Image (spheres, coloured by chain):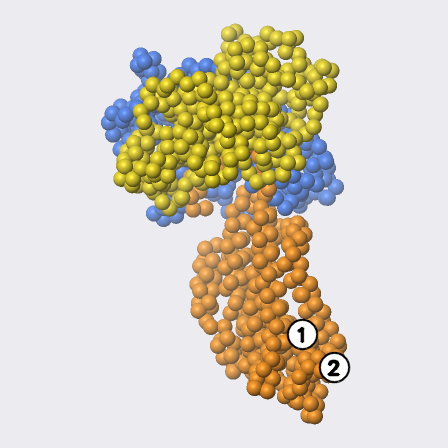
Amino acid sequence: MRSGVLRRVLRIRSAQIALVILLGIAVLVVFGSSIAPQDPLHQDVARLLQGPSGAHWLGTDYLGRDVLSRLVAGSRLSVLTAVEAVAAALVVGALPGLASVFFGRWFDFIANRLTDAIMTLPTLVFAIAFTAVLGNRMTPVMLAVGFLISPYFFRVTRAAALQYAQEPYVDAARLFGVSRVRVVGTHVVGKVLPTVLVTAATALAGALLTVSSLTFLGIGVVPPAPTWGGVLSSDLNFLSQLPWAPLAPAALIMLTAGSLNILADALRDTIGTSGPPVVRAGAITDQEVDRVDEHPAA
Amino acid sequence: MSTNTPPLETRPVLDLADVAISVQDGTIQAVRGVSLQVRRGSSVGLVGESGSGKTLTCRAALGILDRGCRVESGTISFGGTDVSGLDPRQWRAIHGRRVGAVFQDPGSYLNPSVPVGRQLTEAVRAATGLGRRAARVRALELLTLVGLRGAEHVYRQIPGELSGGMLQRVLIAIAIAGDPELLVADEATTALDVTVQAEIIELLRRLRDERGLGILFVSHDLGVIAELCDHVVVFYAGEVVETGPVEEILRRPRHPYTQAMLRVASLGDYRRRELEVIPGQPPSVGERIAGCRFAARCAYAADECRSEAIELVGIGDQHDVRCARIEEIDLVQSDAWQKESA
Amino acid sequence: MSGGAQASEEPVLAVEAVDVYLGRGHRSTRILDAVSLDVHAGEIVGVIGETGSGKTTLARTIVGLVDPAVGAVRLDARVISGTRATRRRQLRRSGHVQYVFQDPLRSLDPDFTVDRIVAEGLVAQGRLGRDEIARRVSQALRRVGLDDELLTRRPAEISGGQRQRVAIARAIVLEPRLLICDEPVSALDASNRNKILRLLDELRTTLDIAIIVIAHDLSSLAGIADRVLVLYRGQVVEDGSIGEVFSRPAHPYTGLLVASAPNVIHRSLDARQLRVVSRPEQVDAAVDGCVFASRCRFATDSCRRRPPLLEVRPGRRVACHHHDTWRAEHVTHP
């Protein structure tokens, strides 16, 4: 990976803020249940649907549970499941994307037709159908989601890898007798990685919303385990009593997804400008004398 | 519009007086003290290695310096009017009407999906204000003028269907669409095949001679300059080191750098021989050097060359040299010409 | 003349009448048409061709990135074209044939440091230890005139001339028998061009290797090549010793090339008199005719037939029906 990319990303103000927010979320994910001020499962029937107070900063839900604690404790399940989905998509999408550059026409053809087919499936509906078959557990559902978003990874990785695999230095390496796997490993992967990271950050934001949607619908999570989407849905049910209640979980989901998107944008912009530096003014630019003519469809 | 016999104008079309250009937001002085003039019907060549400042000078003359680059001092004028302080909008009135330009990679200046004729017609309309139909007729004339056979056919083709040489001809047609007095060509033949390059040079020569077009031609290749230009300006490390009529410069170069350039240039002979090189590398752009900027690579350099800045001095008919030892190293004929006469 | 062709000796490289097609199915086009070429050890042969001449494809065929449909490429008498994957990898790892790509900026991985770039071939061979590789890398760099201080730089951090040297170092570190340089100097200015050409000239004697220099113009060969092969649209139109070919071109195309080359002195041929002014007859319509006929001032009816590549003198071949008459015509028509 280009060493300067991260440094340059960190120079962008919006990316700095996004990164701080994501670091905060990461802390919640790692230490979630231990730093929650109260037991997220503790029900207090005496205090149902209360507004914010000294004891309950974000109030309580319909079972008298502390909302803040539920959100903090729910971070892990919400975020990790989203990460699971993206990791699955990376394996199912990005790896074949890389491979299709070097495994010849047939592999490429089949992989492309398969992704076309997968892309026609509606994510949410398919995930719901999945729970009907595999039972209401989170991991298989998220693997299913990962599978469904894998075409994006496939496309992006394939396009980037194809571009870099045509570079003359890849030919040069092949002419040294370097094996295909090594050529891809040394000359292609590092250059494709930033692009894949951008996709992953965007996809993570998307997956987070999907997880929230699913848990909001009560899919994939067995109560009373707390999740962001779960909190949101329970709050929505009592909208008439506590109209402002969904704000906190919704804000948390939006903040995380938004930060990921901002970071992805910053990363993409940085990669876009990190090509080989322009030779100093007045330089004779290199000529491409007959490459274009002789390799029109290379 | 017919200018078969260009009016004898003494006032130059383009006049650069003591121009200095800075790059990187004024932190680096890349070009200093450049003066040159282009008259109608004449062609002036700027030659030098990459980074010598020839392209910066040419871009400054066109008012298209990149961000962070600025004309620090001196004046640039077109036909007597100072243009150094113009804003982009005012420049637009000059581009196309008074000056046209062509660059190295013609393909990148055209929209790949629009027929070249349509793009040329647009340029004609922008530059002349002609109506659609009249502009089209003019565009076809221009295509023929720049030597494209079957103008009607070429008119309908998109850039991808034309070769590099044909595209450069189309670009030249666009550049002269407004019948400008000056054409600036920056490495305009560099990426072309040799046979095509020769044709483009001939075309430029013809436009100069028949239409009285003034040409400012920038190239790293002294051979190309020799083919086209009647006046040469030799750049080295941001300065003009020698300028004069092409014959004079080729026959009797007086600056050691010009001599060195001639020694390494193509002689048009292909005998096996030890090739000449100029030892060392040029200083980096804007490097501060007391005295002559070429001294470090110069075989004739003496103490007097390294102490103070050297002035450009006139030594004959329009022939100026920036060399402290001009008197002593006089009469050193270029090796190339010695070889030829041998 | 040092290192000239020794006819008795076996050539290092022999390209034998290769036809190369690129593209698939109905889009397949013939890029090289019966091209032959010999190169001996210690010899520099220039291949000159303009856009679409097939010169890069010829290089790619020799190094085995493209397979010929007809004909063969031999290295030291052994066929190296069209081999199977295992043998091909074995050949490549031997490092006998090295290719210096056009445009070093793109053929050097921008993320790699110079030492890693130059070492890549040796690492792929897997025969040498780390220290020995480092030693050879630095030796190769010195051989091309670069300091060890460049070892940790990346391609973007060095000059164009230095990049070209790195590309050459990467090739010679493997002690090749044959070095193919594709447009090694087209991106350099005159002084740096001559420096690189001198380096190649030096390497052929110190390393006793055969060198092919591919170029689109004559100045990229001046002073170093022994022989030259002129390609036009995939066919050899002329070859011979460089002095002869360029002082007395036997093919009108070579004549046009010579006349068109910009130089600071004089010329014996005038490009304007070699160019087609108006096409007198549609000689170019003939599919199997001379490839140059449509641009040839001297084309006649007989040029509808393809002229054979004839050896007009020992070591001098030309494919033109009018090779012995067109110059006279050039002189008589003002």
> Looking at numbered disc 2 in the image, what kind of residue is underneath it?
Gly
Whether residue A136 is visible: no
> Dividing the picture into quarters, in which one does residue C163 lie?
top right
Q: Position of residue A196 (x, y in %)?
A: 57, 58
User: Judging from the image, what is the letter of the chain drawn in blue?
Assistant: C
Q: Between residues B341 and A48, which one lies in front from this camera angle?
A: A48
In this rendering, do the residues under marks 1 and 2 share a single chain? yes
The dot on residue A158 is none
Identified at 68% across, 69% down, the residue is A25
Residue tagged 2: A54
Whether residue B82 is visible: yes
Image colour for chain A is: orange
Mark 1 and mark 2: span between their CA atoms? Answer: 25 Å
Please rate how many residues cluster around mark 1, counting C-alpha atoms within 10 Å: few if below 14, some from 14 to 19, many from 20.
many
Please identify the quadrant where the N terminus of chain B is shown.
top left
B138 left or right of A50? left
User: Judging from the image, what is the letter of the chain drawn in yellow?
Assistant: B
SS for callout 1: helix
> Dividing the picture into quarters, in which one does residue A54 lie?
bottom right
Identified at 58% across, 76% down, the residue is A212
> Looking at numbered disc 1 in the image, what kind of residue is underneath it?
Arg
Residue tagged 1: A76
Q: Chain of mark 2?
A: A
Vertical relation: C30 (above or below) C296: below
Q: Between residues A257 and C257, which one lies in front from this camera angle?
A: A257
Identified at 70% across, 25% down, the residue is B289
Q: Chain of mark 1?
A: A
